[in-house]
Image: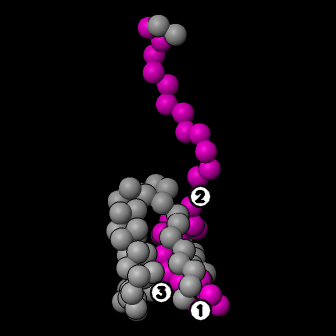
């Protein structure tokens, strides 16, 4: 392998939502006991820190996202490629 050119390989699942927007919020029917935070491929590093902090606030206090963010990131939404256009 000495002097071999570097090779870039992605190994593992690539989990995207159809609209490429992360999922963050309470699971419907869980009585606000289950928080889902997922879908961080692509621009994941950008969202992961914010989503982690927000999920921890949601778990530790009576904290809730603003209503337009709840709609956008909800794990109960029906995502499509036009989700952002419908919200704003």
Range of magenta residues: 3-31
> Looking at the image, is mark 2 or mark 3 earlier in the sequence?
2
Which residue shows up at 35% across the image and 59% down it?
Answer: 46
Q: Is residue 52 above or below residue 33?
A: above
Q: CA distance from mark 1 to mark 2?
A: 26 Å
Task: Classify mark 1: helix, strand or loop.
Answer: loop
Q: CA distance from mark 2 to mark 3?
A: 20 Å
Q: Which mark is residue 15?
A: 2
Which residue shows up at 47% across the image and 7% down it?
Answer: 2
Q: Which residue is mark 3?
A: 71
Q: Which mark is residue 82?
A: none
Which residue shows up at 57% across the image and 80% down it?
Answer: 34
Q: Is residue 76 above or below residue 49?
A: below
Q: Let me know if residue 20 is in the magenta part.
A: yes
Q: Which mark is residue 31?
A: 1
Of 62 and 7, which appears nearest the observer? 62
Q: Position of residue 80 (x, y in %)?
A: 57, 75
Residue mark closest to the camera, 1 vs 2: 1
């Amino acid at each position: 392998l000495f002097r071999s050119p570097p090779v870039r390989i992605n190994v593992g699942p690539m989990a995207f939502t159809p609209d490429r927007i992360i999922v963050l919020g309470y699971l419907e029917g869980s009585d606000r006991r289950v928080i889902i935070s997922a879908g961080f491929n692509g621009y994941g590093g950008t969202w992961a820190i914010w989503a982690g902090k927000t999920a921890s606030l949601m778990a530790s206090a009576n904290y809730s996202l603003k209503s337009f963010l709840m709609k956008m990131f909800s794990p109960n939404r029906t995502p499509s490629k036009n989700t952002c256009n419908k919200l704003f």
